[in-house]
Structure formats: structure tokens, C-alpha cells
Image: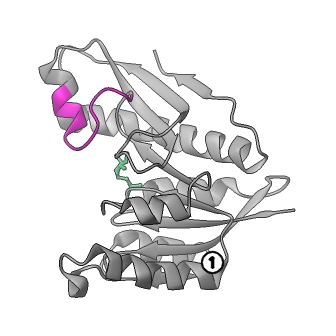
């Protein structure tokens, strides 16, 4: 049975594009919806150009009422009936109630080698720490921010001249390879971790 995938974005959606483009042929999943919390997210046009239905649930009118925002988000998701949700550059923190509702069915990509550097500014923190390697992680989403079971990682060496921006730019193509590889396995019910390296 083909798995229905909804993808949540907040910005340019480059990871969303990679995921959508990967779901073809004998892939066990297909994209059914792209949702953004930002009406101006560049990824919305990209999704539409790829023929994927889109929706916007602007978080701003809800202020600090995360539950109300998530209730509106849940309604949009319920209509699309996704089997899997992929967070892809989605920049809103989700409540434990929402992550519990989608437990075992929601993935996220984070630009660090978790459990290192949960949260923001991961590239700068890896550089400040003097790390020799960096990377990205796809994990199942749980109530713990950036803390769920790891489903895949991609690694690269940190160079002597790297800055947060160069590191982010060199990491993004690895993200675009890792997330589709993990989703393909996950949609087939296979949680064997994926390991990629550009080293
Ligand atoms: C990426 O670095 C991703 O790791 C993080 O958000 C950034 C932008 O992603 N979650 P995208 O281009 O919007 O997919």
C-alpha cells in the first residue's frame, strides 16, 4: 500500500524538493501535501511547480497559543490523511501532545550529528568546538526536541577555512541525499539506519 507523505516547511524547502522528487517509480510513498507555517515560504511555489497540493497555516495569528496553531495544522493534515509526516526545514517547536499524536509516523532532519548540537546554530557550534567532522541526522520526532531515534546520518570533514555558511552549503547536498534514502526505507517499514559520508 503506497504511503501518503505530508511535508512541513517554513522556508526555501530544498529538502522538501529532494523528498518529492525521490517519490517516483517503485518508491513505496507519494507526496500528498506540503504545509508551511509561513505564507511567504519559497518552498510553496516549488511544491506547486512539482504538482504537490499545498496549504498554509500561518502561526502568527495564534501568538503563543501553540495548541491552537496545532489544532489548525491537525485539521489540514487530517484532510490529507498522511501516513508519514516529514519535517523539512520546519522551524516551529511542536508540543508533546502533537508529537505523541504522530509518534512513529513523523521524521525530521537536523543539521548536526545528533546527539551533538540539538537546537539552533549547529554549524557555528561545531566550528567553535573545534570538531573535525560535522553532518546531518534524520530522526523520528518525539517530545524531546531533536532527540528521537536516529534513522540516518551523513558525515563530512570540517575544513580549516570553513565558516558556518560554507559548512551549511556543503552539508545541504548531503541532507538532500540522506532524507530521501531514509524516507524510502522508513516507508517500507525498515528502520535500519542509513549512513552516508562525503569524507
Ligand atoms: C536545512 O539546513 C535543514 O537541515 C534545516 O533547515 C535548513 C533549510 O532547509 N532543518 P530547507 O532548504 O528549507 O529544506
Quadrant for the N terminus, please. bottom right
Q: Nearer the viewer, residue 92 or 159?
A: 92
Q: Is residue 194 left or right of residue 171?
A: right
Question: Is residue 124 shown in magenta?
Answer: yes
Magenta span: chief secondary structure = loop
Q: Quadrant of residue 80?
A: bottom right
Is the residue marked by circle 1 packed among few (<14), some (14-19), or many (20+) residues within 10 Å? few
Left or right of 119, for residue 30: right
From the viewer's perspective, tell me whether residue 172 is left or right of residue 76: left
The image shows residue 54 at horizontal and vertical percentages of 52, 81
On the image, the x and y values in percent for residue 87 come to 46, 57
Would you place residue 8 above or below residue 183 in this image?
below
Residue under pointer 1: 51
Number of numbered discs visible in the structure rendering: 1
Would residue 162 be visible to someone looking at this image?
Answer: no
| Residue 139 in the image: above or below residue 30 | above
Disc 1 secondary structure class: loop
Decide if residue 172 is on the left or right side of residue 59: right
Q: In the orientation shown, which residue stands out farthest toward the left?
A: 128
Q: Which residues are magenta?
A: 114-125
Picture quarter containing residue 120? top left
Q: Residue at x 69, y 45 (%)?
A: 186
The foreground one among 85 and 13 is 85
Q: Position of residue 84 (x, y in %)?
A: 63, 60
Percent x, y of residue 89: 38, 56
Quadrant in which the C terminus appears: top left
Which residue is at 48% across, 83% downward? 55
> What residue is drawn where x is 65% and y is 70%?
82
- The image quarter containing residue 122 is top left
Amino acid at each position: 500500500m503506497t504511503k501518503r507523505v505530508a511535508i512541513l516547511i517554513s522556508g526555501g524547502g530544498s529538502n522538501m524538493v529532494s523528498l518529492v522528487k525521490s517519490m517516483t517509480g517503485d518508491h513505496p510513498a507519494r507526496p500528498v501535501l506540503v504545509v508551511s507555517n509561513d505564507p511567504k515560504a519559497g518552498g510553496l511555489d516549488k511544491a506547486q511547480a512539482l504538482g504537490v497540493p499545498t496549504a498554509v497555516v500561518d502561526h502568527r495569528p495564534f501568538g503563543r497559543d501553540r495548541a491552537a496553531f496545532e489544532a489548525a495544522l491537525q485539521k489540514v493534515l487530517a484532510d490529507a490523511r498522511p501516513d508519514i509526516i516529514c519535517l523539512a526545514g520546519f522551524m516551529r517547536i511542536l508540543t508533546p501532545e502533537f508529537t505523541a499524536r504522530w509518534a512513529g509516523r513523523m521524521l525530521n532532519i537536523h543539521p548536526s550529528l545528533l546527539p551533538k548540537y540539538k537546537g539552533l546554530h549547529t554549524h557555528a557550534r561545531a566550528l567553535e568546538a573545534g570538531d573535525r567532522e560535522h553532518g546531518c541526522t534524520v530522526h523520528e520526532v518525539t517530545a524531546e526536541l531533536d532527540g528521537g531515534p536516529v534513522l540516518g546520518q551523513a558525515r563530512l570533514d570540517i575544513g580549516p577555512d570553513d565558516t558556518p555558511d560554507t559548512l551549511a552549503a556543503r552539508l545541504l547536498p548531503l541532507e538532500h541525499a540522506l532524507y530521501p534514502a531514509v524516507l524510502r526505507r522508513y516507508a517500507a517499514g525498515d528502520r535500519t539506519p542509513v549512513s552516508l559520508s562525503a569524507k
